[in-house]
């Protein structure tokens, strides 16, 4: 059962000069959800997030974030949101503890010393509290950034590619922490390029060139795309890729280990295209399209907004 909406906006639009970078996007994210926000670089994800938390003023649109008007009450929204940017934005010549203390001062966190100490303990940073932030590895920088986001006890976290450049174990630990916090009622909107992370989200939205193309659960997103995918392996399967890409009806050919995924939007046309290649030595089978297949399809079928 879904909780009350934390983000509920319609028609959100942002232009820079003559270019529309966010084009009338609607989004509804409910309390306790982990909502994935996906799309290629330059698609408008970061711009949209900054509008939600009041760092950018929308040129159009309406709705609420945390029950506050997204346009008129941005200052109140900022106080209840934690925003983790793509780039590490803390002082490299301050220690972990000093950085957290600074953030606590900015937010006017009551009982600041106790709050910082509790944050260090909760995120496993206590033993490293005297280490300079500039000396931290990617995973530890990530923990510091999350700790800083949580200091003022926000109700919504906006995380912009939080695991970029982080090793697999640190990414898994980070996502375990996210789900623990979501179980306590915290809501997340997270941008990511990792499909394994997208599959851990309750719902997903995909934006390309400023347009919201699809949203829903993982299964809903895959089903909505109506993409047909075949897998081929054996023989020199990888060597078939250039020839398959030239065939009408083939939308994409992607290598997965020693096999290929061959996808198309028209099931009949795709089956006709691969028929000449179904020869002895190759094993063809129809498979369920994955998120990566769907998102590549969406990206390739969308139109550049450079001049829009």
Image: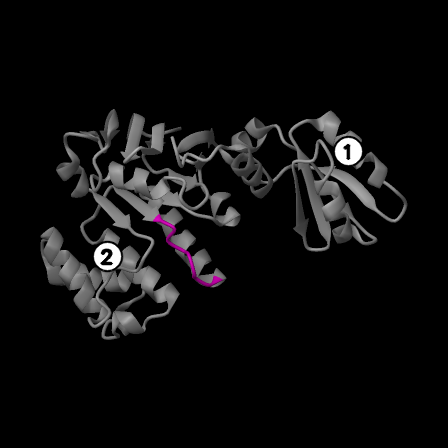
Residue 4 appears in the rendering: no
* Vertical relation: 194 (above or below) 222: below
At horizontal 9% and vertical 53% (from top left) the residue drawn is 110
Crowd band around label 2 with a 10 angstrom C-alpha radius: few (<14), some (14–19), many (20+):
many
The main secondary structure of the magenta stretch is: loop
**Highlighted range, magenta:** 160-167
Q: Is residue 22 left or right of residue 117?
A: right
At horizontal 30% and vertical 52% (from top left) the residue drawn is 85
Residue under pointer 2: 148
Residue 168 appears in the rendering: yes
Residue under pointer 1: 273
Query: In the structure shown, which secondary structural element does the residue marked by tag 1 occupy?
Result: helix
At horizontal 33% and vertical 30% (from top left) the residue drawn is 3
Mark 2 to mark 1 CA distance (whole Å): 53 Å
* Vertical relation: 237 (above or below) 7: below
Q: Which of 35 and 305 is in front in this view?
A: 305
Image coordinates for residue 69, horizontal then vertical, percent: 19, 28
Query: In the structure shown, which secondary structural element does the residue marked by tag 2 occupy?
Result: helix
Residue 94 part of the magenta segment:
no
At horizontal 26% and vertical 48% (from top left) the residue drawn is 83
Quarter occupied by the C terminus: top left
Quarter of image, res 46: top left
Q: Is residue 205 left or right of residue 146?
A: right
């Amino acid at each position: 059962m879904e909780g009350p909406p934390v983000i509920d906006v319609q028609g959100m639009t942002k232009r820079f000069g003559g270019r529309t970078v966010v084009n009338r996007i609607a989004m509804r994210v409910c309390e306790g959800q982990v909502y994935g926000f996906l799309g290629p670089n330059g698609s408008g994800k970061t711009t949209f997030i900054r509008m939600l938390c009041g760092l950018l003023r929308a040129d159009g649109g309406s709705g609420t974030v945390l029950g506050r008007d997204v346009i008129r009450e941005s200052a109140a929204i900022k106080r209840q949101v934690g925003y983790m940017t793509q780039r590490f934005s803390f002082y490299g010549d301050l220690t972990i503890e000093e950085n957290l203390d600074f953030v606590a001062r900015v937010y006017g966190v009551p009982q600041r010393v106790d709050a910082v100490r509790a944050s260090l303990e909760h995120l496993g940073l206590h033993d490293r509290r005297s280490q300079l932030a500039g000396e931290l590895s990617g995973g530890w920088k990530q923990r510091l950034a999350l700790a800083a986001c949580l200091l003022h006890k926000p109700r919504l976290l906006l995380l912009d590619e939080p695991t970029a450049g982080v090793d697999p174990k640190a990414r898994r630990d980070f996502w375990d922490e996210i789900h623990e916090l979501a179980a306590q009622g915290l809501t997340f909107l997270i941008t990511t390029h990792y499909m394994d992370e997208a599959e851990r989200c309750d719902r997903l939205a995909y934006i390309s060139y400023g347009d919201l193309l699809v949203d829903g659960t993982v299964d809903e997103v895959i089903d909505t795309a109506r993409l047909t995918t075949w897998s081929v392996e054996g023989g020199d399967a990888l060597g078939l890729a250039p020839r398959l890409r030239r065939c009408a009806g083939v939308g994409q050919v992607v290598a997965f280990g020693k096999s290929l995924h061959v996808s198309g939007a028209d099931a009949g046309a795709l089956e006709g295209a691969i028929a000449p290649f179904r020869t002895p030595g190759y094993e063809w089978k129809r498979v369920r399209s994955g998120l990566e297949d769907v998102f590549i399809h969406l990206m390739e079928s969308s139109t550049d907004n450079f001049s829009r």
